[in-house]
Image (cartoon, grey):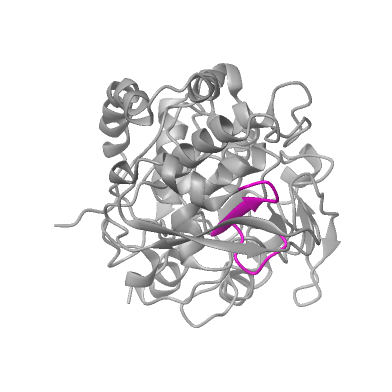
């Protein structure tokens, strides 16, 4: 079994803070150790009165807020009687008042390995605040549930920087939270004092099921490790008026719309370029969100080979087919999206308006990937300098 950063911390004999340091903890309900004990309780037991506050990311401490731009309030944690400061409310960055509660910020969050998942940017904002305030940041590392080898997609154009993409990284970045933090802190000039407590036994080829750890959904619509596998592609539907499966038991694993005709979509796709996945035609009625209580026709994604599956390529291919077939019915979502009120949500998600324009113009996905390869090679070389884990 892989040993998580929190368990590595507890098994050690020294700690990344002083005896007089006040500690803050950025976490949510999924911040559990191997025995499903919560990090805030373990750290409080370890440090007695040094733990002074908790901070929570998007979806709230209990991961009970379902959708984007649904804010969480500050609260008091009933078990520890500590204040919980929301970093997805009036502010997405730690305020001066919050920073006044701690000297060291410990971060224990489960990421999902995709550029648009906001937890990594909450961490980046915390790094910036910590730099300004002279605070130390400690990352308790966790697995990238979709592995640390594969990377995929175009790098974000800084012109489309937002809370779903702050840095020029690909859609699938292949880093753990600890590695990502070290990379952005150095490469993008944040300059915080950072220490990572690494996992033990994690290898880059591992998907979450390989760790033998319990999967705890880090956000409401990330219910299983398989959701994380398809998410780097299926998240693009959030920028459209196609259902991404919210309001069903299989968010992101399903997608569709009332006007889709699955047979002609399948006929339009080049399946030879979409390995490792079977798209099973289905009908479904979302109980909330887009097309609530309307019959949608679409697909359930069955990943048959994780190593060859290209989630971003697969979903872009499907999007292009839908644009081509259903131009009169298909539409994009309108702003706002993650506090961006002018730019198209689809462009923020794709990280570059040119990706959308090329899809609309009928440019082959494989040709687009060819254009991204140089940037991906440069990113790959950069990220490898921050690897904490190998397969050797």
Asked if residue 371 is positioned above or below residue 259 in the image, the reply reads above
Where residue 123 sits: x, y (%)? 58, 44
Residue span colored magenta: 246-260
Asked if residue 124 is positioned above or below residue 175 in the image, the reply reads above
Of residues 92 and 375, the one drawn nearer to the viewer in this rendering: 375
- Is 145 within the magenta? no
Kindly give the residue lying farthest to the left in the view shown: 392
* Left or right of 363 on screen, residue 354: right
- Residue drawn at x 57%, y 46% as measured from the top left: 235
- Residue drawn at x 78%, y 66% as measured from the top left: 82
* Left or right of 332 on screen, residue 226: left
- Residue drawn at x 35%, y 40% as measured from the top left: 270
Kindly give the residue lying farthest to the bottom in the view shown: 35
Secondary structure character of the magenta stretch overall = loop
Of residues 140 and 378, the one drawn nearer to the viewer in this rendering: 378
Of residues 66 and 354, the one drawn nearer to the viewer in this rendering: 354
Asked if residue 244 is positioned above or below residue 183 in the image, the reply reads below
Where residue 56 sits: x, y (%)? 70, 55
Where residue 136 sits: x, y (%)? 55, 44
User: Which corner quadrant holds the C terminus?
Assistant: bottom left
Q: Would residue 259 be seen by someone viewing this image from the given angle? A: yes
Q: How many marks?
A: 0
């Amino acid at each position: 079994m892989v040993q998580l950063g929190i368990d590595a911390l507890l098994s050690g004999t020294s700690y990344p803070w002083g005896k007089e340091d006040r500690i803050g903890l950025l976490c949510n309900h999924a911040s559990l150790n191997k025995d499903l004990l919560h990090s805030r309780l373990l750290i409080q037991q370890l440090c007695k009165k040094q733990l002074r506050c908790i901070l929570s990311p998007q979806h709230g401490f209990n991961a009970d807020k379902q959708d984007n731009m649904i804010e969480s309030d500050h609260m008091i944690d009933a078990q520890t009687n500590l204040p919980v400061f929301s970093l997805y409310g009036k502010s997405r960055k730690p305020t001066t008042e919050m920073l006044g509660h701690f000297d060291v910020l410990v971060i224990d969050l489960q990421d999902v390995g995709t550029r648009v998942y906001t937890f990594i940017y909450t961490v980046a904002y915390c790094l910036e605040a910590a730099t300004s305030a002279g605070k130390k940041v400690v990352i308790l590392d966790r697995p990238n549930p979709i592995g640390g080898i594969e990377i995929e997609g175009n790098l974000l154009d800084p012109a489309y920087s937002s809370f779903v993409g702050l840095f020029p990284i690909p859609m699938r970045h292949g880093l753990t939270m600890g590695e990502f933090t070290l990379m952005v802190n150095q490469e993008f000039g944040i300059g915080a004092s950072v220490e990572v407590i690494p996992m033990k036994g994690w290898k880059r080829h591992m998907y979450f099921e390989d760790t033998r750890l319990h999967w705890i959904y880090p956000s409401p619509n990330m219910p299983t490790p398989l959701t994380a596998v398809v998410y780097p592609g299926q998240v693009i539907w959030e920028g459209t008026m196609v259902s991404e499966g919210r309001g069903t038991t299989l968010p992101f694993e399903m997608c569709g719309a009332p006007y889709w005709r699955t047979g002609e979509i399948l006929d339009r796709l080049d399946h030879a370029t979409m390995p490792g996945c079977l798209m099973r035609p289905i009908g479904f009625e979302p109980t909330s969100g887009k097309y609530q209580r309307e019959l949608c026709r679409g697909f359930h994604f069955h990943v048959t080979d994780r190593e060859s599956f290209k989630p971003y390529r697969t979903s872009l291919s499907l999007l292009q087919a839908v644009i081509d077939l259903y131009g009169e019915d298909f539409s994009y979502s309108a702003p706002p999206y993650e506090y961006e009120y002018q730019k198209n949500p689809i462009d923020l998600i794709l990280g570059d308006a040119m990706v959308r324009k090329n899809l609309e113009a009928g440019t082959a996905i494989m040709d687009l990937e060819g254009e991204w390869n140089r940037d991906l090679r440069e990113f790959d070389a950069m990220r490898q300098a921050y690897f904490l884990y190998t397969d050797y």
